[in-house]
Structures are given as C-alpha cells and as structure tokens.
Amino acid sequence: MVQFRFRRWLCWCLAIVLSCSLLAGCSVNSGAGKTLRVATEPAFPPFEFQGKDGKLQGFSIDLIKAIAAAADFSVDFENIPFDGIIPALQAKTIDAAISSMTITQERSKTVAFSRPYFQAGLAIATRTDNQEIKSFDSLQNKKIAVQIGTTGAEKAKTVPGAQVRSFDSAPLALQELLNGNVDAVINDAPVTLYAINTGNLQGIKVIQQLLTEEFYGIATAKNSADLSLINQGLSKVLENGTYHKIYQKWFKSTPPVLPEKTPFANENKANINSFSLIWQSLPTLLTGVVVTLQLAFLSVVCGLVGGSLIGIMRLSAIKPVRWLARAYIDFFRGTPLLVQIFMIYFGLPAFCQELGFTWSLNRLVAGVIALSLNSAAYIAEIVRAGIQSIEIGQSEAARSLGLNSLQTMRYVIFPQAFRRMIPPLGNEFISLLKDTSLVAVIGFEELFRKGQLIVAENYRALEIYAAVAVIYLCLTLVSSQAISSLEIWMNPTKKSNSKI
Ligand code: ARG
C-alpha cells in the first residue's frame, strides 16, 4: 500500500513537471491516416543518421517511411538518446521507435516488437596495429568501449576482468578506440563496417567472426494498437519488393530471408516493487556518489587556486595581464561546459594524433581539468568582486598604520573580502557538484551515469532517476548547511551571538 502511494506520488510529480511539454507535443491518434511519433537515435549510420543537409536518412528511415506509406499513416520523427527510447515508450511520449533495436528477451518484457526487419550481429573492433585481440576470449582483462544500453554493452559485461566504458553514442565509443584509450569496441557489425568503408574510421579493423546473431525490430509500448498497423505495413513492403530495393540501396547486396517471429513475443516482467528496486540499486548509486564527491572536491580546490589567481590578475595594474584574465573568463564562461569536456577529452588527443603523436588523457584528469577550468572563471569574478567591495578607507587606514600593500591585502582586505565571498563561493560549489553529472558523457561512472546504467538494465526510469535526484538533493543540502556554518564561523558578530 505504502509503496503504491509512493509510486503514485512520484508519477504526480513527474506529470506536473512534464505537463507543459506534453501538452505541446500531443498528436491525434485515431484511425487511418494518423500520425505516429517515431523515435530514433540518429547516430548509427547506415541505419539512422543525419545527412549533410541535417535531414534524417538511412536504411531504417527509408524503411519506416515505406511502411508508413503502405499502412497509411504518417511519421513524426523524434530524436531521442538510445537509452531513453524504452523509458519514452513506457511513458507513451512516443508511439514507436525504429533505432536498430535488437529484439531481446529482456526488452520484450517491457516493450512490444514488430516482426524482425533486419538481421545483424555484434562484432569486435580494434586498432589495425593490435595483434593480440583475435576473438572474444582474447578480450579478457582488456578495456572495452560500448554504447550505453545496447546489446554490445551487455555482451561486454560477460568478458571476465574487462573494464567496460559506456558512451552515449556508438561514434563516441569508436572515437575512444581511435584515441587509444581502450583496446576494443563491441558494436553492431554493419555500423562499424560502414564507418570503416566510408573512410570515417581510419586505423580500425573489425574481427570478422560475429559474436551474436541479432534481429532488429520496431518497438512500441506493450499492447499498443499501432503495432498491428506497423506489422501490416512491414509485411507489405517485404512482399512488394520495396524492402529489397531499400536494402540494395544501403547495403549493395540482396537481403537474407527474415523470420516472421522471434522466440520472445509476449514476455512479461516480474514486477518488483519500487522500494525494493531502489534499495537494490542503492549500493551501486552510492559508489557513484563517492566518484561524484571526489570529482567535485578536486575540481573545487583546483578551481579555487586558479580562480583566485585569475581574480587577482583582473585587478592588476598592468593592462595586458588584466586583458588576459578577462579573455580567459569570457571564454570559459561563454562556452558550454559540455563542449569544454568534449574538447578536452576527445578533441585534444585527436588533435595530437593529427600532429603525429599519440597522447591520451585519463578520464578523472580530463574531468577535473574541465570542471576546474570552468569554475575558475566564475570563482575569479567572485574573488575580484569580493576584493573590490572592501571600502577604500580600509586600505588607507592599513597604509597609515605602516602596512605594505601585500600585508594590507593579507591582513586587512582579504579576510574581510573572503567573508563576503563565502555565499557566492557556496553557490559555485553547489553548481559544480551538479555539473559533475555532465562528465558522464566521457564514460565517467559518477552518480548520474550509475543511474543511467541501472535504467539501461531494468528500464525503471521513474524510480531510479527519482532516487538519483534525491541523492543529489541530500548532497547539496549538506553542502549548503556546511557553507552556512562556515559563514557563521567566519563572522565575528554572528559567532559570538550563536554562542549565547
Ligand atoms: N542493436 C543494438 C541494440 O539494440 C544497438 C542499437 C543502437 N542503436 C542506435 N541508434 N544507436 O542494443
């Protein structure tokens, strides 16, 4: 009963937050000629990707358009991250998904699949100069990159002793291999082969032997009326030769005969209750908390040192020094942190390779560098404003007592300024704590990524992300309490009051 109420309460909270966007995104779904909202993650060429003109294209895109024409419905594409597709189908914010999604037993417990529309399989990719990796067994104790929530990620988990790093998209996992940070990538064979054949991935080879045989299906929510419509259309295009033509266009070969069904059609999930689910996930989430805190503390310390230096440079009497500090602040404050993380982790090593030498960055180091460089820009402004806020009379008085400028700063200005800086510095720390979640994009398994990984396995987005949010909230509440205590402790008047 309590657990039911808790779930209902969570649903309400989510419903309120999402109501505006849902209202805006509603579409009418009745009878023939209706519009289906179809999700895809267009970073998986040749199946689904964005062409040079920004338009969606690929085998799956052509296929769903043909299916829509055959079954008399129209398609509204929605671009959704791969690991968000099943939660979105469950939440019914989309009607169907065509995203090279393998029909698996586990997924069939949560969503319904059309008849198979493509036969694929997983393959290992390594660098061409790697002579060690020749088969699945040789992956033992190696570093493997995968796309989060995919069958490749599942397969990588079964390799004994392997370190698995998960990325938001397949191209990012392949970039990690190119940059020399991992030994192999497990990905759908046609996708890796396409990237190599189109010349986009130089220096990478595919181990020929496939690890699995998989079939892609179009997914809908369980018991969705749209599924039979999609199946009708798919059967039509398979029979009338349209499928054949589309296959020829993208793969320059004749398609294999596809089965009409896969073994897992109407699976049902054993429904584990929300409390036990969160309870079971807690140890994993807490390991993420440790990483998040580590990242936040290291970055805030480096950010404080760097920011104070830059803040003081901003007050320098020498013009070029002031300009330099200003340029730094403008750059790091004016560009998104996410872009900075990508530039540092993926961009710099790729740039070095262009120059002819191999160099890669450890993820913790890259994360800390990106977060500290960014927060240093904000901290510099806090330091500058704090120092400038101290009345000129204070330094005049200090000078008249015979203190030199360094002593004036050290004993008179800075202690007072620092007290004023505490609240904005506290804000900065709290933002930084939350911003650590952005480092998930480089495969860093901090709190948010741990949550994503759990959802990728059990598709219980509501409970897991709610738990993640509550943990972040606890962390920020504890931090703001600590900051308030520091503020009281640093304030001589409040300090004596609080003792009374
Ligand atoms: N076939 C694999 C799976 O279902 C990978 C699909 C990834 N698709 C994508 N659009 N990124 O897990």
Image: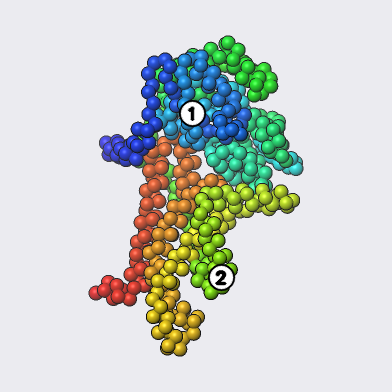
Q: Which numbered circle lies on residue 362?
A: none
Q: Is mark 2 within 8 Å of ligand 1?
A: no
Name the residue that disc number 2 marks.
Answer: 319
In depth, the one of 346 and 312 nearer the eye is 312
Give the distance between the C-alpha atoms of the residues marked 1 and 2, in whole angstroms: 53 Å
Q: Amino acid at mark 1?
A: Phe
Place of residue 7 in the rendered image (x, y in percent of width and height, measured from the top left): 32, 37
Farthest-out residue, front: 319
Classify the position of the N terminus by image quarter: top left
**Is residue 424 depicted above or below 31 in this figure?**
below
Does the rendering let one see residue 4? yes
Place of residue 366 in the rendered image (x, y in percent of width and height, measured from the top left): 58, 54
Place of residue 348 in the rendered image (x, y in percent of width and height, measured from the top left): 64, 52
Q: Amino acid at mark 2?
A: Lys
Left or right of 404? Residue 118 is: right
Name the residue that disc number 1 marks.
Answer: 77
In depth, the one of 274 and 86 nearer the eye is 86
Farthest-out residue, left: 500
